[in-house]
């Protein structure tokens, strides 16, 4: 009898990670006012993996996300995104790579108030050069994914905080970017809404995205494949999600 196996979902272990950070140091400011936000962090996030980043306030979580997505450059060390060393890229090339490869959900949602929700979500695709009709169709699909199918024609100011949060998440998801960076994406959501969003991120990872999720909540970190704990700008612990230690 022939044994049937499901096709392998994850890439081979030696496949290049979507993002590879090696010995990353980030110092803000200079001299006596210098703040060492990261002190030598190394982290690989392969396709298909959801990594939760936890740690106390000020431990460097947002800085780590910004560096992984090329929104900021390291003081020392290397960040390679989809095979490209970010240090070697001009500002223009870096902006292109960032836009093509990464989707971000910030604590500050950054929705444009004069555009409708659907227009906000379609915008990254239009910037990618996708035709308006196609970009709008993609936006509609992703709004459905986050439970906002009926609200695409509203303006951000006409939504609740939780709905605005979902709209920002939809904008990060549109276009199937290979790296998703989410900094406390569940902040304005109740538990059920938060669970739904984490499940969307989980599905995207299962479909092949690399996902970095900053969260203070063990219940959300439990959806991750791996939890990285930062303390004082260093990786204090990195463990498979099981979550007894998630504090
Ligand atoms: N632009 C900046 N200029 C100066 N210091 C900064 C800057 N950005 C971050 N820092 C400092 O770097 C350290 C790490 O900040 P970061 O925002 O990465 O921490 P965090 O773990 O995300 O915190 P939180 O959970 O409160 O969001 C903090 O001491 C912070 O004050």
Image (cartoon, rainbow, N blue to C red):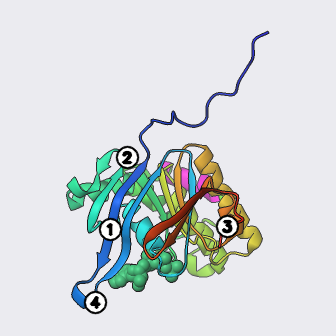
Q: Quadrant of the rendered structure where residue 208 is?
A: top right
**Residue at the spot of label 4:** 33
Mark before the other along the chain sequence, 1 or 4:
1
Report the residue at 55% width, 56% height from top: 139
User: Does any portion of residue 95 appear in the rendered image?
Assistant: yes
The tag on residue 245 is 3
Report the residue at 62% width, 68% height from top: 166
The residue positioned farthest toward the right in the image shown = 1
Q: Residue 57: x percent and y percent? A: 52, 81
Report the residue at 50% width, 36% height from top: 13
Which is closer to the viewer, label 1 or label 2?
1
Mark 2 vs ligand 1: CB below 8 Å: no
User: Residues in magenta?
Assistant: 134-144
Which is closer to the viewer, label 3 or label 4?
3
Q: Is residue 175 above or below residue 1?
A: below
Helix, strand or loop at mark 1: strand
Which image quadrant: the C terminus? bottom right
The tag on residue 82 is 2
The residue positioned farthest toward the front in the image shown = 236
Mark-to-mark CA distance, 3 and 4: 34 Å
User: Does any portion of residue 147 appear in the rendered image?
Assistant: no
Q: Nearer the viewer, residue 61 or 89?
A: 61
Mark before the other along the chain sequence, 1 or 3:
1
Q: Residue 188: x percent and y percent? A: 64, 78
Mark-to-mark CA distance, 2 and 4: 34 Å
């Amino acid at each position: 009898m022939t044994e049937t196996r499901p096709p392998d979902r994850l890439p081979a272990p030696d496949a290049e990670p979507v993002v590879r950070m090696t010995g990353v140091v980030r110092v803000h400011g200079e001299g006596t006012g210098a703040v060492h936000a990261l002190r030598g962090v190394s982290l690989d996030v392969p396709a298909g993996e959801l990594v939760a980043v936890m740690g106390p306030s000020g431990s460097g979580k947002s800085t780590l996300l910004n560096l992984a997505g090329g929104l900021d450059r390291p003081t020392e060390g290397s960040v390679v995104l989809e095979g490209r060393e970010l240090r070697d890229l001009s500002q223009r090339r870096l902006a292109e790579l960032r836009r093509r490869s990464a989707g971000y959900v910030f604590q500050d949602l950054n929705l444009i108030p004069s555009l409708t929700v659907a227009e906000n979500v379609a915008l990254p695709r239009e910037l990618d050069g996708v035709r308006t009709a196609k970009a709008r169709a993609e936006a509609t699909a992703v709004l459905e994914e986050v439970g906002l199918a009926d609200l695409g024609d509203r303006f951000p100011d006409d939504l609740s905080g939780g709905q605005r949060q979902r709209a920002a998440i939809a904008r990060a998801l549109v276009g199937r970017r290979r790296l998703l960076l989410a900094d406390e994406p569940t902040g304005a959501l109740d538990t059920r809404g938060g669970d739904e969003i984490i499940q969307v991120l989980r599905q995207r990872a299962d479909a092949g995205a690399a996902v970095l999720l900053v969260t203070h909540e063990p219940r959300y970190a439990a959806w991750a494949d791996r939890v990285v704990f930062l303390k004082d700008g260093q990786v204090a612990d990195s463990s498979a999600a099981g979550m007894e230690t998630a504090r």
